[in-house]
Image: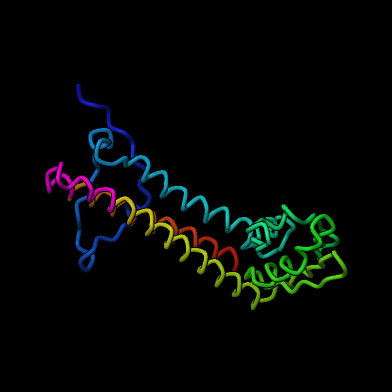
Amino acid sequence: MASPAVPIRYFATKKAKAKGKGQFQTRVNLNAALVEDIISLEEVDEEMKSVIEALKDNFNKTVNIRTSPGSLDHITVVTADGKLALNQIGQISMKSPQLILVNMASFPECTAAAIKAIRESGMNLNPEVEGTLIRVPIPKVTREHREMLVKLAKQNTNKAKDSLRKVRSNAMNKLKKSKDKVSEDTIRLIEKQISQMADDTVAELDRHLAAKTKELLG
């Protein structure tokens, strides 16, 4: 009995650009269940989807016109105990619409590292310190600030594409290990499927960037 087709998520079916000066190329839609002994396309698909979800999460938390306490939560602070999220070592609160406070009383030894991480977060923040209390004035929403956020969104999207390339590369390397056991035609089809999934994911990342850019610039 034939195995039922396992659904594979595609992202840019209508807008996917074929390589070779825009000429039409036939899309591959392999039955993932039939090739699972060679490679799990479902796992590859999940890893690619996780790249998109991570970018969306990043946009929601760090690329906003209005800086909020939640925007600072996941700023990575390099400490003697390793890399920790700011909200793990500091108590973050909103003092006023123009000011966020980060209380480092529980981990005073990490105060300097936290200030450095906030300054280098790419969010255009200039923290000030009073003992173990870090004061973070919220930037005014100027055109310059909006454009800085767009630049940050592009940087984060490029990082997401780097992560995607690693997922694709790992999948291709795994596939190469089966070249002695599987026909060349089958390998080529799977390679095309993986490349197609990666191209569709890139298109989805670009769509999220375009939407975020429109939101930021108004």
Where does the image place residue 117, in percent across and percent down from the top left? 67, 67
Which image quadrant: the C terminus? bottom right
Residue at x 78%, y 63% (from the top left corner): 109
In the picture, measured across the screen, residue 185 lies left or right of residue 86, that is left
Q: Is residue 184 magenta?
A: yes
In the picture, measured across the screen, residue 88 lies left or right of residue 190, that is right
Q: How is the image coloured?
A: rainbow
Identity of the residue furthest to the top in this view: 1
Identity of the residue furthest to the bottom in this view: 144
Where does the image place residue 164, in percent across and percent down from the top left? 40, 57
Which image quadrant: the N terminus? top left
Q: Quadrant of residue 144?
A: bottom right
Q: Quadrant of residue 139?
A: bottom right
Identity of the residue furthest to the front in this view: 80
Quick check: 112 above or below 171? below
Residue at x 82%, y 67% (from the top left corner): 135
The residues colored magenta run: 173-187
Where does the image place residue 35, in percent across and percent down from the top left? 24, 37
Task: Please tell me which residue lies in front, 111 or 207.
Answer: 111
Where does the image place residue 115, in percent across and percent down from the top left? 74, 69
